[in-house]
Image: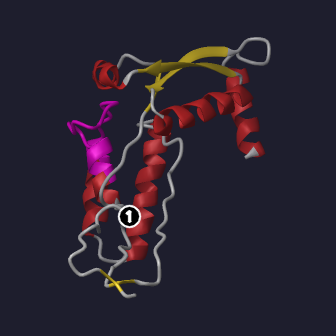
Amino acid sequence: MQKNRAEAREIMRNLGYGPDRRLQLKVSTRNIPPYRDPAVLLTDQLKEVFVDGELEIVETASWFPKVARKDYMIGANLTGGGVDDPDQQLYENYGCGSPRNYTGYCNPELEQLFDRQSMEADQGTRRKLVWEIERKLAEDGARPIIFYNRFAYCWQPTVKGWTMMVNSIINNWRMEDVWLDR
């Protein structure tokens, strides 16, 4: 992390910024904790590389119109999905013409890699393709990922018949085969 920060500070110095000349910008986000808290952390971390971020809190009713107008310098937004799989994330967030591709990023050649990874049966090969896609998205600054959330399950041993999903914590809430063994 310290090496990355040192490299970032050097990039900023080459652009004319430093401890005495800091970049000023606004970080806009919704006024609810899952959005606001990471935005606060982001503005704090940016200080390490000569960037002073002013947090702009936006009420939820105004947030999506603001995003649609692209009326922000940095818009801290969350993206969630029912399936933890690259297909949903790639096509939805980076696909040309996708309504949830808020930045308008479009790379038809990269979309061909989306298709290749989607059809790949070998998990190792698919993983390599996804990393290649993510590396290209990061290089292009398509929609930088600030953090990934982690979730976990907790349940009691008396809960029976419940199947834990391997690709999501969201898409397995059908309980017709679940019972309590007491």
Q: Is residue 102 magenta?
A: yes
Instruction: State the residue at coordinates (35%, 73%).
Output: 165
Tag 1 secondary structure: loop
| Residue 163 position within the rendered picture, expressed as x and y whole percent measured from the top left | 33, 79
Q: Answer whether residue 143 is magenta in the image.
A: no
Position of the C terminus by quadrant: bottom left
Q: Residue at x 35, y 24 (%)?
A: 63
Which residue is pictured at 40% across the width and 53% down the height? 133
- Residue 118: image location, x then y, percent: 27, 64
Residues shaded magenta: 89-110
Query: In the rendered picture of this protein, how many numbered marks are placed on residues?
Result: 1
Q: Is residue 123 above or below residue 34?
A: below
In this view, 177 is above or below 68:
below
- Report whether 114 appears left or right of 123: left
Residue 3 percent coordinates (x, y): 76, 44
Measuring 28% from the left and 23% from the top, which residue is drawn there? 68
Residue type at numbered disc 1: Ile
Relative depth, front residue between 178 and 24: 178
Return the residue found at the far front.
182
Q: Is residue 133 left or right of residue 16?
A: left
The residue where tag 1 is placed is: 169
Along the line of sight, the residue nearer the viewer: 3 or 101: 101
Dividing the picture into quadrants, the one containing residue 120 is: bottom left
Residue lying farthest bottom? Answer: 181
| On screen, residue 158 above or below 101 | below
Residue 144 at x, y percent in the picture = 48, 38
